[in-house]
Image: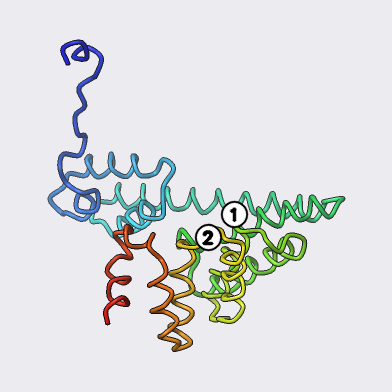
Amino acid sequence: MIDFENEFPEVSRLFGEAAMEKLLNEDISSSSMKMKALVSLSDNASKTDVALIKNSLSDRDDEVRLYSFAVIDKLERGINGKIHEKLKSFNQAESLKERVVRADELAHLYWDMIYFELADENLKKFIVNEVKKYGKIVLDEDPDNEKINVLLGKAYLMAKEIDEAENCFKNVVNNGKNIDFIVPYLAEIFFLKRSFAKVKNLFADTQGLRTNTLLYPIVEQWSMR
């Protein structure tokens, strides 16, 4: 291993051993450290990152609160700007193919508002309807589109349109794609329909979820006799 000693740089932990959530929520954490954490989270923020940033909106430090608001506002404005741009392209599209492409983009952009929890309860219903509206345009031309079937399934599930959601998820399963990924959604639908035997059978036939640390306890619970 001597040959490698000069090839690997030393790496130090900027935030120590603490989890990011603990660092941002601890009153004893310095404002400068919290700001560094927020800056690191703001680049290509995931859903979890956005949730942590939103929690910082109630921080005691004015600078931390203002920066958190600026990051959330920038993300929301960015998505809204893209939606406005794609809507204009959709309305000006000269061919059906182009309209379908723009509809696909719009459906996913509207869902981003839901995914990142940027919409309040009053706006969420409108956004879900927009996802369904543009998703249907794509599905009419491409019924086997996996991504749109999954997206519409989640939108229908959120709107409590259970049968429609089930049809979308089953379209994916019938095409033999991402079956393990779809199982939790179908299980939720069968549970809402009180078809508990179907939930049990669904988990029994799915081995891939046993390696999922989040879903493993649920799979085990439904596998018990």
Indicate the position of residue 78 as horizontal and vertical percent values: 55, 48
Please indicate whether residue 152 sits to the left or right of residue 24 in the image.
right
Secondary structure beneath disc 2? helix
Q: Nearer the viewer, residue 25 or 183?
A: 183
Task: Find residue 199 and report its image quarter.
Answer: bottom left
Secondary structure beneath disc 1? helix
Classify 10 Å Cα crowding around label 1: few (below 14), some (14-19), many (20 and above): some
State which quarter of the image contains the C terminus. Answer: bottom left
Residue type highlighted by circle 2: Met
Indicate the position of residue 184 as horizontal and vertical percent values: 43, 69
Circle 2 or circle 1, nearest the eye: 2
Task: Find residue 207 and report its image quarter.
Answer: bottom left
Q: Earlier in the sequence, mark 2 or mark 1?
A: 1
State which quarter of the image contains the N terminus. Answer: top left
Residue 113: mark: 2
Classify 10 Å Cα crowding around label 2: few (below 14), some (14-19), many (20 and above): many
Residue at the (76%, 65%) spot, across then down: 140
Q: For the view shown, which residue lies furthest in the left direction?
A: 28
Indicate the position of residue 135 as horizontal and vertical percent values: 67, 64
Residue type highlighted by circle 1: Asn
Please indicate whether residue 47 sits to the left or right of residue 221 in the image.
right
Residue 197: mark: none
State how far apart marks 2 and 1 are (Cα): 9 Å
The residue singled out by tag 1 in the image is 80
Q: How is the image coloured?
A: rainbow
Please indicate whether residue 143 sits to the left or right of residue 1 in the image.
right
Residue at the (75%, 52%) spot, across then down: 88
Residue at the (47%, 71%) spot, across then down: 185
Verify CB contact (< 8 Å) between mark 2 and mark 1.
no
